[in-house]
């Protein structure tokens, strides 16, 4: 007689709750990533309507990026100290309210301040989404699958931003690029209390936050990111760049000393870096994002300034990349379990580097290059490889981390991702600009000269992503904790890892 394998009511309830956690985490990462990219197409209309100066207009983007990168580590630690439910609700509510104020802005000062507030809310929201998944799904195949879904949603949002931004700006006006996330944010805030328990992800003991460490890492990170962003319009030797960069690095050095010697309850525990998977995954993430973030932005310039595409058509030109990202992220989980993080990251980064090399070769053909062979096909390879690599990197960066440190591990990984993207954008923009200037000489840059600049930048990006593949082979572990679960066994830490329960 066959055993009854029908799930019990409790099991069905738990599975339903897990699906809601996944939906909630994906909604959070979707609005954060979408908001970082959707505004780019609307900038010309914002400048005309609100009267931004040419020098102040970039701060519509920079204010968001600066606050986001500066407060990520603090946001992750707050998840561990105060609980995921509280921080996720707080981050989403703050992010949504700030988005509403962005859409209602009547002056440059109001919009820039609201964008900074959005970045602050995102810094608390983003680590909470990842920590909610790692607290709900134990290490093993199920975590790999849900992280693949989470990464796919981020890739969709990154690619959908320019497309949706172009549609909204052209048909409804620029204010809707900020207002579009408000209904989703309100729904998420209302649903969260019924999905996550009050103590989910918290320490369960006395609440302690390293205020001095939080101030040091926030100030240091913000200074470094500000200097890097400033270097795009000023030389690295400029008095507005190198003193700020040097000061930021010194403050971050002081933060490291404080964590190791003086902090009673360190914001970033030194023991976290004793885990090989955490160290190597964050190093690989930095190299990957050096080439990833800048490529998306420079490719949009290539489509508009070299090929002459209108904003809406340029956004549509990203669709093969978005499709590649969805395919890569959805297949990353199973392959990461089969090959281990080291093999999966090396394979995917090599594929991403190959796509970037194709974009570099295609850009050398100038404005006459056919779209499908110079952009669509290599762009799809780039999307598949780079988007898929984020899943095994995230698996490694969170493997073996105790639940009470899940938030800060997520905050650290996202901080590295943001700083790597900012540094990569500054460096590759400089490469593109200097190459273009060398080709144009004393004349105004032609589309062919611009194409040469973008080709050089894509080639450097390919080198960075290829370096990530090599570093993964050298430094990352062959398998992460939790791979034993595929063989029917689990480590003691896995067996003790609790599930997130719904609150009353």
Image (spheres, helix red, strand yellow):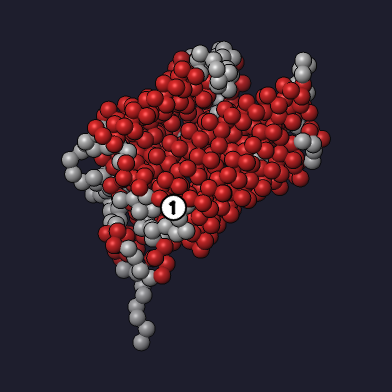
Query: Where does the image place residue 18, in percent across and percent down from the top left?
Result: 37, 55
Quadrant housing residue 273: top left
Identity of the residue furthest to the left in this view: 206
- The residue at 43%/36% (across/down) is 415
Query: Where does the image place residue 64, in percent across and percent down from the top left?
Result: 46, 27
**Quadrant in the picture for the N terminus:** bottom left
347 up-or-down from 176: above or below: below
Quadrant housing residue 294: top right
Quadrant housing residue 51: top right
Query: Where does the image place residue 209, in percent across and percent down from the top left?
Result: 25, 34
Identity of the residue furthest to the right in this view: 368
- The answer to whether residue 202 is left or right of residue 335 is left
Residue 42 visible within the image: yes
Q: Which residue is mark 1?
A: 395
239 up-or-down from 353: above or below: above
Q: Residues within 10 Å of mark 1 (few under 14, many from 20)?
A: many
- The answer to whether residue 475 is left or right of residue 204 is right
466 up-or-down from 54: above or below: below
- The residue at 56%/25% (across/down) is 174
Query: Where does the image place residue 50, in percent across and percent down from the top left?
Result: 54, 15
- The residue at 39%/25% (across/down) is 250
**Total number of numbered discs in the rendering:** 1
**Front residue of 336 and 194:** 336
User: Helix or strand or loop: what does disc 1 sit on?
Assistant: helix
């Amino acid at each position: 007689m066959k055993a009854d394998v029908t799930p019990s009511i409790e099991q069905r309830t738990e599975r339903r709750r897990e699906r809601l956690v996944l939906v909630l985490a994906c909604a959070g990462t979707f609005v954060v990533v979408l908001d970082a990219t959707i505004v780019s197409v609307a900038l010309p209309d914002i400048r005309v309507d609100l009267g931004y100066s040419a020098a102040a207009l970039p701060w519509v983007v920079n204010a968001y990026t600066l606050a986001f990168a500066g407060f990520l580590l603090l946001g992750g630690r707050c998840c561990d100290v105060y609980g995921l439910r509280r921080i996720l609700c707080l981050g989403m509510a703050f992010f949504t309210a700030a988005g509403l104020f962005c859409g209602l802005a009547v002056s440059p000062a109001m919009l820039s301040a609201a964008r900074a507030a959005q970045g602050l809310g995102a810094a608390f929201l983003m680590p909470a989404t990842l920590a909610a998944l790692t607290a709900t799904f134990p290490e093993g195949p199920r975590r790999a699958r849900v992280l693949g879904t989470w990464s796919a949603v981020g890739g969709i949002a990154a690619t959908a931003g320019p497309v949706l931004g172009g549609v909204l700006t052209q048909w409804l006006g620029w204010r809707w690029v900020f207002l579009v996330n408000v209904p989703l944010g309100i729904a998420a805030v209302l649903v969260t209390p019924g999905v996550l328990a009050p103590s989910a992800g918290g320490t369960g003991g006395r609440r302690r936050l390293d205020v001095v460490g939080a101030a040091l890492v926030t100030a240091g990170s913000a200074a470094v990111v500000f200097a890097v962003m400033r270097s795009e319009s000023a030389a690295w030797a400029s008095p507005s760049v190198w003193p700020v960069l040097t000061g930021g690095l010194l403050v971050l050095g002081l933060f490291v000393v404080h964590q190791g010697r003086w902090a009673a309850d360190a914001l970033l525990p030194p023991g976290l870096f004793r885990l090989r998977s955490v160290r190597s995954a964050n190093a690989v993430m930095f190299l990957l994002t050096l080439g990833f973030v800048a490529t998306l932005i420079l490719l949009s310039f290539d489509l508009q300034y070299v090929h002459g595409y209108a904003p809406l058509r340029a956004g549509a030109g990203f669709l093969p990349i978005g499709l590649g990202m969805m395919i890569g992220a959805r297949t990353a989980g199973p392959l990461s379990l089969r090959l281990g993080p080291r093999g999966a990251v090396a394979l995917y980064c090599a594929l991403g580097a190959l796509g970037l090399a194709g974009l570099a070769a295609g850009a050398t053909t100038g404005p006459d290059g056919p779209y499908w062979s110079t952009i669509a096909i290599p762009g799809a390879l780039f999307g598949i490889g780079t988007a898929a690599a984020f899943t095994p990197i995230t698996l490694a960066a969170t493997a073996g981390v105790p639940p009470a440190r899940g938030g800060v591990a997520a905050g650290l990984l996202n901080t590295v991702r943001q700083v790597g993207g900012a540094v990569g954008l500054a460096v590759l923009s400089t490469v593109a600009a200097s190459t273009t200037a060398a080709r144009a000489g004393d004349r105004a840059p032609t589309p062919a000269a611009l194409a040469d600049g973008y080709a050089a930048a894509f080639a450097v990006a390919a080198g960075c992503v290829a370096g990530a593949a090599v570093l993964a082979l050298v430094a990352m572990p062959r398998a992460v904790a939790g791979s034993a679960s595929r063989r029917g066994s689990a480590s003691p830490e896995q067996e003790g890892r609790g599930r997130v329960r719904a609150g009353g």
